[in-house]
Image (spheres, rainbow, N blue to C red):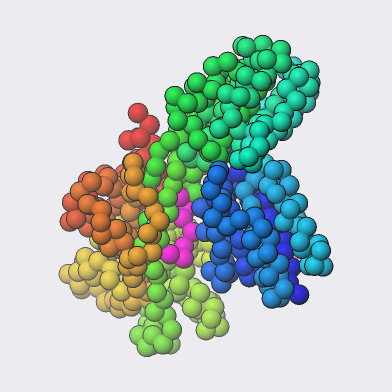
């Protein structure tokens, strides 16, 4: 018999799912997920797991709750490890209790992993502390949503007497009735109130007024679900304590092109600045280290080489991983010096406990070659380990200067069109390109997008040349580093 785990995914920000929730997700055979689960968290579901979207919109339930309950039971009875991934917390108006009833009746093993509820996080990301000793000592969470054939049943008089912070979840459609009910029960019309839409996400919007003006304000700005309504004097602190929307790149949308299997340092740093970083895995890295006769021969004759040259962190990682797989003693490289094209590649190598001997001032392949020529002693030989379709310029520099070298391809970059059908490129500010291959991959991945409509940020001149070939409007970072790319984005977007 299998097991079912209800996991709270939190309110949207992927960083708010708990460590235990992530562990359960990675162990799952089947994942049933809701509409309110963030795309980044859905992307974390193991490729081997069956993914079932049971998302529900207000008034639109493609998969009825009863069917969800039956599906959980069926999958568990098949001996599978099932995760029910729910937005927010499973037991805070998440209907988690209903889903456990059938499992308990059939003796199915189950567990519940709490999640951060938007009832708390919505205020936090809007600069509203739901409790504050100078304003209130209690917070009350109320549902503002009922079945279609029912009417709201809220004891407004009791809520007003509590004199605490009131958080109404799923109450957008009934906001006018809720605010009117509070006023009728004796609450001051000027009581501060706020609505937070898409809380904790990069599309978050907040509007602050009072209980008399908030419904009109929400209607004028087209506020829709999911949103939380917060009523209480603590709402007056929103501007003072706002930290999320004041991040330098908040409200900006940037596409980060990358390899399918690689994590994006650029993406993570952009998110820290409040940017909506949309990851587009448009290329795939295919290692060429296995059954590579040229590489095998070079390693067998490693004493013939004086320098190892890496033009990317990917190449460095693949090379040193291959040495581990072969049980190649790294001490056999004791006589060899290391050259890296730039600071990012240098960091990758140094993580292996190996220090780089040469990095050019300008981070590019040609500059690496030109600079290395001045470092070489007579009769020294170079081993270049890089991509199959790397630029020929670096080889031309060595050849022109009569430098002995061997160029070995240890990986290939393959474009993967058709992998990003769900990516919305509407209102994109910039697309970032860290190599020519990401440009090629992006263009092939989005054949319906006119490249001339794209603003591209390129890591170097060679990448920019490739982008310009397609008519992409380009800017180039001052240095070929992730840090420099981010600084350039801040320069052009923080107007």
Q: Report the residue at 67% width, 41% height from top.
A: 117
| Camera-nearest residue between 300 and 137 | 137
Q: Is residue 476 left or right of residue 124?
A: left
| Camera-nearest residue between 485 and 256 | 256
Q: Report the residue at 38% width, 45% height from top.
A: 254
Q: Report the residue at 55% width, 83% height from top.
A: 327
Image coordinates of residue 356 in percent, x first then y, are 44, 62
Tell me: residue 130, above or below residue 349.
Answer: above
Specify the segment rendered in magenta: 260-267
Tell me: residue 403, above or below residue 31.
Answer: below
Q: Which quadrant does the C terminus fall into?
A: top left
| Camera-nearest residue between 303 and 124 | 124
Image coordinates of residue 465 in percent, x first then y, are 20, 55
Answer whether residue 229 is magenta in the image: no
Please indicate, yes or no, whether residue 71 appears anywhere in the rendered image.
Answer: yes
Q: Report the residue at 58% width, 27% height from top.
A: 175
Q: Magenta segment, principal secondary structure?
A: loop
Image coordinates of residue 110 in percent, x first then y, are 77, 62
Please indicate, yes or no, whether residue 353 appears anywhere in the rendered image.
Answer: no
Residue 154 position by quadrant: top right
């Amino acid at each position: 018999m299998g097991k079912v785990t209800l996991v709270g995914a939190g309110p949207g920000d992927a960083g708010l799912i708990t460590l235990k929730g992530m562990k359960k997700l990675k162990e799952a055979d089947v994942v049933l997920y809701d509409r309110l689960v963030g795309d980044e968290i859905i992307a974390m579901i193991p490729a081997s797991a069956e993914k079932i979207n049971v998302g529900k919109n207000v008034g639109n339930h493609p998969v009825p709750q009863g069917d969800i309950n039956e599906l959980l039971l069926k999958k568990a009875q098949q001996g599978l490890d099932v995760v029910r991934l729910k937005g927010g917390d499973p037991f805070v108006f998440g209907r988690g209790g209903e889903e456990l009833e059938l499992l308990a009746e059939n003796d199915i093993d189950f567990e519940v992993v709490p999640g951060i509820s938007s009832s708390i996080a919505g205020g936090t990301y809007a600069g509203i502390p739901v409790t504050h000793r100078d304003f209130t000592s209690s917070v009350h969470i109320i549902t503002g949503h009922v079945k279609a054939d029912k009417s709201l049943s809220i004891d407004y008089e009791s809520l007003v007497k509590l004199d605490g912070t009131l958080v109404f979840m799923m109450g957008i459609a009934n906001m006018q009735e809720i605010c009117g009910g509070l006023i009728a029960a004796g609450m001051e019309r000027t009581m501060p109130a706020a609505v937070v839409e898409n809380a904790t996400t990069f599309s978050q919007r907040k509007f602050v007024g009072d209980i008399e003006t908030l419904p009109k304000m929400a209607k004028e700005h087209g506020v829709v679900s999911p949103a939380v309504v917060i009523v209480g004097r603590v709402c007056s602190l929103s501007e003072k304590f706002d930290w999320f929307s004041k991040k330098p790149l908040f409200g900006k949308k940037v596409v980060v092109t990358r390899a399918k299997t690689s994590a994006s340092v650029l993406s993570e740093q952009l998110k820290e600045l409040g940017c909506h970083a949309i990851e587009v895995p448009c290329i795939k890295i295919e290692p060429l280290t296995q059954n590579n006769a040229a590489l095998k021969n070079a390693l067998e004759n490693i004493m013939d080489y004086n320098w190892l040259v890496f033009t990317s962190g990917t190449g460095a990682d693949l090379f040193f991983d291959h040495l581990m797989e072969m049980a190649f003693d790294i001490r056999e490289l004791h006589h060899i010096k290391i050259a890296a094209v730039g600071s990012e590649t240098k960091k990758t190598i140094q993580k292996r406990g190996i220090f780089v001997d040469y990095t050019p001032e300008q981070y590019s392949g040609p500059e690496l070659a030109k600079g290395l020529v001045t470092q070489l002693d007579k009769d020294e030989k170079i081993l270049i380990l890089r991509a199959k379709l790397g630029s020929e310029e670096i080889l031309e520099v060595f050849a022109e200067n009569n430098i002995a070298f061997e160029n070995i391809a240890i990986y290939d970059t393959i474009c993967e069109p058709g992998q990003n059908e769900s990516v919305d490129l509407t209102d994109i500010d910039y697309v970032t390109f860290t190599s020519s291959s990401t440009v090629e991959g992006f263009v092939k991945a989005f054949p319906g997008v006119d490249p001339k409509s794209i603003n591209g940020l390129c890591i170097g001149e060679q990448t920019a040349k490739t982008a310009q070939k397609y008519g992409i409007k380009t800017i180039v970072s001052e240095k070929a580093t992730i840090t420099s790319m981010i600084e350039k984005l801040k320069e052009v977007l923080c107007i």
